[in-house]
Image: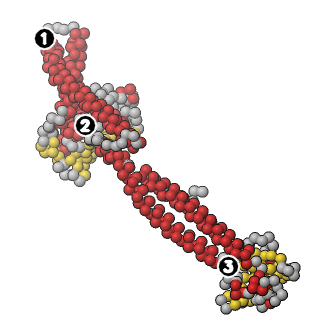
């Protein structure tokens, strides 16, 4: 049933082991206690049945004669009620009637008044020389035995069960106290023992937590020490050893990856630096050839113009790669007050000139928003975001630039109502050379090499800021947050 409340179950391994230990001990104690109580109760009732057998029917037989047997009875001492145990019950049954009932008290024989329920119980006692338990309303619970009398009547002798019940209850109380104390001590000692036995797992957890907090995505990573001393013969020690070996492999892999990244960055920086001069030279020679006054065939002119355009594009790509390599190397940027409001105005003006087919909208605060950073790089961030919106959306798209101050942060948002960024591209949209030209709608303009958004992310990170993307068909928003401090 859904409404039934479930018992709370411990979640940690330490709590489960302690709980299982206490439960097993509790079950064992309960089994021992129940067996002891049942055995003691059976033993005492057996002794009581032996006493009834030894007492025979002397007391109920004497009830007709006022508590003594007649003189001609064999062995008159047997009819002396003073030899009966205090509390002995006797009754004489004739047919379905109980004619006499009495109990031996400290002062002698006392008649007992029986109700119909008591009579019904005594009538049903079988004459099998075995003890039977009855509960008499005028007395208490008795163990009785029935035998046939000399006159054809049935003589019933009984002894109280109160001493047996008192002894059993005392055993139950002692067992509950002893077992309760044992469970408490075992629970505390077991919890301490389990905690000591699982110490290597606690250290594994702490080490794994520290590793999970490390920036493993890139850069040099120093893993925490892995000295997890534990007995390799135990399961806990085997887990700790396997975790140590795994961290060793991870550390080696991270070291090799960092070395490879460093070599790649160094190569990109060197290659970009070395390519700047020949690319500029090719572009310069192409432009110089276009300025030649002599007649030049049209095919040659078109080829020279393509050479100049492609060399210019290649130069921009080289500059972007060199910038990314310098940012990766952690080279410091210029630091100074930058008026983002003026910078955004200039960038939107340039975007309007470059993309007259788009609708450009500005939403600026009344007060200027000023941050500390590199003005040229921040202008490049805004320009790249606007160029991304212009190049990857068709003509007629509404592009809105928001700038506002939120606490100690300056927030720049570039929103467009274009087709959106494909879902499979969004996770890596800020990675280098990420392009989604095959998903563009008709009317979109071709883009660059896929370095613009990676420069946005790298420059924002170098300024201690963040950049994020939220996109769906009809709504795409790039958000850049920079500290104003």
Q: Based on the displayed image, in which of its 4 quarters is residue 390 positioned?
A: top left
Image position, residue 442 (x, y; %): 39, 28
- Report the front residue among 7 and 58: 58
CA gap between label 1 and label 2 equals: 61 Å
Task: Residue under label 1, please give it.
Answer: 293
Expressed as whole percent of the image width and height from the top left, the position of residue 471 reads 37, 39
Mark nearest the camera among 3 and 1 is 3
Q: Residue at x 27, y 29 (%)?
A: 257
Q: Is residue 99 visible?
A: no
Find the distance from the CA under tag 3 to the CA under tag 2.
84 Å
Would residue 98 appear left or right of 159 to someone viewing this image? right
Quarter occupied by the N terminus = bottom right
Q: Position of residue 403 (x, y in %)?
A: 25, 46
Q: Nearer the viewer, residue 352 or 240?
A: 240
Residue 13 vs 283, above or below: the answer is below
Residue at (72%, 90%) from the top-left corner? 110
- The circle on residue 81 is none
* Numbered label attached to residue 221: 2
Number of marks in the rendered image = 3
Q: Which residue is mark 3?
A: 160
Residue 339 in the image: x percent, y percent? Answer: 16, 45
SS type, badge 1: loop
User: Which residue is at 70% across, 83% downward?
Assistant: 84
Say which element carries label 3.
strand
Q: Give whichever of discs 3 and 2 has the lower sequence position.
A: 3
Earlier residue among tags 1 and 2: 2
| Left or right: where 176 falls relative to 60 | left
71 versus 329 height, above or below: below
């Amino acid at each position: 049933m859904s409404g039934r409340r479930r018992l709370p179950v411990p979640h940690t391994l330490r709590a489960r082991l302690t709980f299982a230990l206490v439960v097993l001990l509790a079950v064992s104690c309960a089994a021992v206690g129940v067996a002891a109580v049942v055995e003691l109760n059976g033993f005492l009732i057996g002794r009581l049945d032996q006493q009834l057998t030894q007492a025979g029917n002397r007391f109920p037989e004497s009830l007709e004669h006022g508590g003594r047997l007649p003189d001609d009875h064999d062995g008159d001492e047997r009819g002396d009620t003073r030899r009966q145990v205090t509390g002995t019950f006797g009754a004489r049954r004739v047919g379905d009637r109980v004619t006499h009932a009495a109990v031996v008290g400290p002062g002698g024989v006392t008649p007992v008044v029986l109700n119909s329920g008591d009579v019904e119980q005594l009538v049903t006692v079988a004459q099998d020389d075995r003890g039977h338990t009855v509960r008499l309303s005028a007395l208490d619970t008795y163990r009785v035995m029935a035998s046939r009398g000399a006159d054809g009547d049935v003589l019933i002798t009984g002894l109280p069960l109160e001493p047996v019940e008192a002894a059993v209850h005392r055993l139950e109380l002692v067992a509950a106290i002893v077992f309760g104390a044992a469970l408490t001590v075992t629970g505390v000692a077991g919890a301490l023992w389990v905690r000591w036995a699982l110490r290597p797992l606690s250290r594994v957890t702490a080490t794994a937590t520290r590793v999970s907090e490390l920036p493993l995505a890139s850069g040099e990573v120093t893993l925490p020490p892995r000295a997890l001393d534990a007995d390799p013969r135990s399961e806990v020690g085997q887990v700790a050893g396997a975790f140590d070996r795994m961290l060793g492999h991870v550390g080696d892999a991270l070291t090799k990856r960092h070395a490879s990244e460093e070599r790649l960055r160094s190569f990109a920086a060197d290659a970009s630096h070395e390519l700047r001069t020949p690319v500029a030279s090719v572009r310069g020679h192409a432009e110089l050839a276009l300025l030649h006054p002599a007649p030049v065939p049209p095919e040659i002119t078109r080829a020279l113009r393509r050479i100049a355009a492609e060399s210019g594009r290649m130069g921009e790509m080289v500059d972007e790669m060199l910038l990314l390599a310098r940012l990766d190397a952690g080279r410091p940027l210029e630091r100074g007050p930058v008026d983002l409001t003026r910078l955004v105005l200039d960038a939107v003006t340039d975007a309007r000139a470059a993309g007259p087919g788009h609708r450009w909208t500005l939403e600026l605060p009344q007060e200027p928003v000023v941050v500390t950073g590199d003005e040229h790089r921040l202008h490049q961030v805004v320009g790249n975001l606007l160029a991304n919106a212009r190049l990857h959306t068709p003509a007629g798209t509404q592009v809105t630039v928001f700038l506002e101050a939120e606490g100690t942060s300056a927030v720049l948002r570039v929103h467009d109502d274009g087709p959106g960024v494909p879902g499979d591209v969004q996770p890596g949209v800020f990675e280098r050379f990420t392009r989604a030209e095959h998903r563009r709608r008709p009317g979109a303009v071709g883009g660059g090499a896929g370095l613009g958004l990676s420069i946005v992310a790298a420059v924002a990170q170098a300024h201690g800021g963040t950049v994020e993307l939220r996109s769906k068909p009809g709504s795409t928003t790039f958000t850049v947050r920079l500290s104003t401090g």
